[in-house]
Amino acid sequence: MPGSMKAPATDSGTKAAEAVIAMEPGKAIRAIRGHLPDGTADYVAELLRGEHLGGTAVEVRSVRARRSKLGDHRAPVRGRTIHQITVNNDLNPYAFLTTLLHEIAHAVTWEKHVRPRKPFSRRVLPHGAQWKSEFGQILAPVVEQGALPEDVSGALARYLQDPAAATCSDRGLLVALARYDTPDPGRKLVEEVAVGAAFRVEGGRMFLKGPKLRSRFRCYDAKTGVEYRIHPLCRVTLCDGAAPADRSQ
């Protein structure tokens, strides 16, 4: 990989991260290295031990795929003493890295903009200006140093001009990332399934597809009728008798 990636500079006076990081950076990276693109593990480790996290511990785990989100971040509140980050374990390396950096940006935003302002932290929106700035700074070295394929880097560069509330809501970025998924001819994207058709998600649960809302499809559990919102690029398996949507119109 050309060049080298450096974590964003931090404000002087921020205390350095301690080696007692929950799943300390080296250990955390060993746990997720297989999910990351070649040449990016050291940069992620640097972010996890960086001063911009104020010495607060960070736990990173890959978890079973979830229908509603690619990753999440939990701040050290309500009895938690560490930041907790999870990322779906079925993501390809480029999608995994993008999601992980998205969640690390939440941790950095909390340490730099929320913790110092408590109890007035509600003024800092989860995906507001502060988060967009931190995510842009964290993501920029990955884009600039050629760590990703050209099409993914291009999509991320466009995304950085105005980051959406979630990387999974930017269709251009998602399509670029999806090109590197492991091919599976037996599965379809939810957006390719006809409205009213039945499909199964990972784990075997069956749903009936409903209409599209703003960014997801309204779907119904085939057994209970309970409504769920499922992402259009979620990969599913068609049930017997279900046909792909007619996209010729």
Image (cartoon, rainbow, N blue to C red):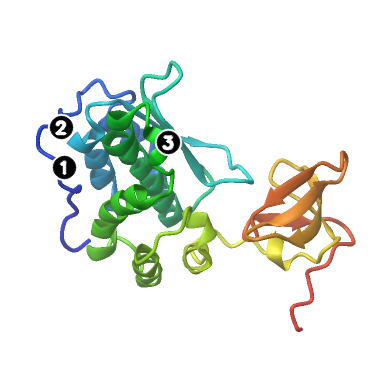
Q: Residue at point 75% right, 83% down?
A: 248
Instruction: Measuring from the top left, give residue 246's x and y in whole percent.
Output: 79, 76
Q: What whole-number distance in Å separates the C-alpha atoms at marks 2 and 3?
A: 22 Å
Nearer the camera: disc 2 or disc 3: 3
Q: Quadrant of residue 53?
A: top left
Instruction: Measuring from the top left, give residue 71's x and y in whole percent.
Output: 49, 43
The answer to whether the residues at label 2 and label 3 have Cβ atoms under 8 Å apart is: no
Q: Looking at numbered disc 1 in the image, what kind of residue is underneath it?
A: Thr
Q: Residues within 10 Å of mark 1 (few under 14, many from 20)?
A: few
The residue identified by callout 1 is: 10
Q: Nearer the viewer, residue 197 or 239?
A: 197
Q: Secondary structure at mark 2?
A: loop
The answer to whether the residues at label 1 and label 2 have Cβ atoms under 8 Å apart is: yes
Q: Would residue 87 be visible to someone looking at this image?
A: no
Instruction: Measuring from the top left, give residue 15's x and y in whole percent.
Output: 15, 28
The residue identified by callout 2 is: 14
Q: What whole-number distance in Å separates the C-alpha atoms at marks 1 and 2?
A: 7 Å
The residue identified by callout 3 is: 122
